[in-house]
Amino acid sequence: MCALPVALPRCGESATLRLEIYSASGGERCGSLDASAYTCGQHGIPMMSAFELAGLTARRVPLAPDVWRPCGYVYVYQTGALAAPAGIAHPHWCDRHGCDQSGRHRSIRLPVNSGHPDPVIVDVALTHSLGGATQPTLSVTAVHDRGQEIVLSLGQARVLCHQVRRLLNLARIGRRL
């Protein structure tokens, strides 16, 4: 069901700690949130070490008082890099809806909205052909009532720059996995 690259300690006792598992590290920035792992106090450090040896980042987070999980239980998020592919392999940034129909992967669309009324509706997304031979591309969708020339406000241009950087970081992280 998942592609955990590591064998984890488990005893089945009641978990007292939850670990968030990320596919990439970089100081305070983490890549994809891939899983939540639950452990007892005795196996917390060995479990964190096992994830770190596998190149994953494990961060401690509070365990909600009304949640019971056995030590060694791991929940893999479907949108994470460790999720098992369903039919086709998806990049970690793919929203996984309609890939086979469109013939390409597509990230969520990020709006380029300056917070003020703008004459053009713009959003950006990553796309990638299902063949996988090419690198991901940036899709810019703009809707304007006249259609010909599209001119963005300076506010939209700033937001577009930010959104493009976010998508480029997603694509860059994906190549390192």
Image (cartoon, rainbow, N blue to C red):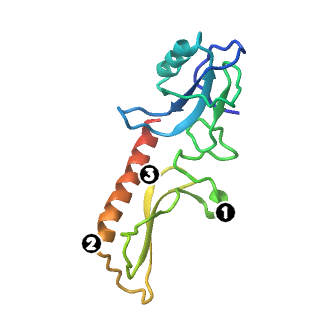
Give the mark toward the camera: 2 or 1: 2
Q: Position of residue 54 (x, y in %)?
A: 50, 22
Q: Residue furthest top?
A: 42
Q: Which residue is mark 1?
A: 101
Marks 3,2: beta carbons within 8 A = no
Q: Which residue is mark 2?
A: 154
Q: Position of residue 155 (x, y in %)?
A: 30, 70
The three-letter code of the residue at mark 2 reads Leu
The three-letter code of the residue at mark 1 reads Gln
Label 2 vs 1, first from the N-terminus: 1
Q: Quadrant of residue 85?
A: top right
Label 3 vs 2, first from the N-terminus: 3
Q: Position of residue 19 (x, y in %)?
A: 55, 27
Marks 2,1: beta carbons within 8 A = no
The three-letter code of the residue at mark 3 reads Gln
Q: CA distance from mark 2 to mark 1?
A: 36 Å
Q: Residue furthest front?
A: 65
Q: Look at the picture and state if 146 lies above or below 81.
A: below
Q: How many C-alpha atoms fall within 10 Å of the one at disc 1: few (<14), some, or many (≥20)?
A: few
For the point 35% across and 84% down, the residue is: 149
Q: Circle 3 — which element? A: loop
Label 1 vs 3, first from the N-terminus: 1
Q: Circle 2 — which element? A: helix
Q: Which residue is mark 3?
A: 135
Give the mark toward the camera: 3 or 2: 2
For the point 42% across and 86% down, the residue is: 147
Quarter of the image containing the N terminus? Answer: top right
For the point 55% across and 38% down, the residue is: 81
Give the number of marks.
3
Q: How many C-alpha atoms fall within 10 Å of the one at disc 2: few (<14), some, or many (≥20)?
A: few
Q: Which numbered circle lies on residue 61? A: none
